[in-house]
Image (cartoon, rainbow, N blue to C red):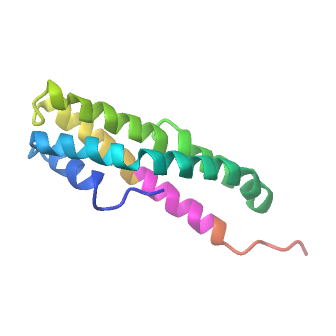
Amino acid sequence: MSFAPHGFLEYLERIAAGEATLEDLHGIRIQLDSTEESIEFHLDQLSAYREKLREARGMVASEKLDTIMYDRFGKDRLRQMLSELAQTEDNTDPRSDATVARAKEILAAVKQLNIQIAELHDMILEPIQQAD
């Protein structure tokens, strides 16, 4: 679920630093195309897992999973934001202030998403408290 340090992030970091070329925007588009089916499959699997997570760990954990998947800066929305950024390849300077600002926004959201994923992971692995 998390965004790995390779792939999207290497392109986003160059764009956010104002050092991008059109190849960076193109690279994002290629990454999106190559991972689309896999991501949709995993989001479907996680949706099915949500009920089991709720039963095992409670509503807080299942709601955290929903946030990670579909919230304003969830995995699904971030992919849409990346797609919108990559679409600028055809008509925008990758070093423009607007493109750099958008990349910084997406990069910050990705970092926050990775934190949320780690928090949910820790929550899932926490020993279940037994009632006395």
Q: Is residue 53 left or right of residue 102?
A: right
User: Does residue 74 appear in this view?
Assistant: no
Please provide percent x and percent y for residue 43. Answer: 56, 47
Please provide percent x and percent y for residue 74. Answer: 49, 43
Q: Residue at x 32, y 42 (%)?
A: 106
Viewer-closest of 47 and 125: 47
- Name the quadrant containing residue 98: top left
The stretch drawn in magenta includes residue 129: no
Q: Main secondary structure of the magenta part?
A: helix
- Name the quadrant containing residue 86: top left
Please provide percent x and percent y for residue 81. Answer: 36, 35
Q: Residue at x 40, y 35 (%)?
A: 80
Q: Is residue 3 left or right of residue 15?
A: right
Which residue reaches farthest right? 132
The stretch drawn in magenta includes residue 121: yes
User: Does residue 89 appear in this view?
Assistant: yes
The residue stretch that appears in magenta: 112-123
Please provide percent x and percent y for residue 109. Answer: 38, 45
Q: For the image shown, how many numbered marks are present on the structure?
A: 0
Q: Residue at x 66, y 72 (%)?
A: 126
Q: Is residue 9 left or right of residue 91?
A: right
Above or below, 57 relative to 32: below
Q: Classify the position of the C terminus by image quarter.
A: bottom right
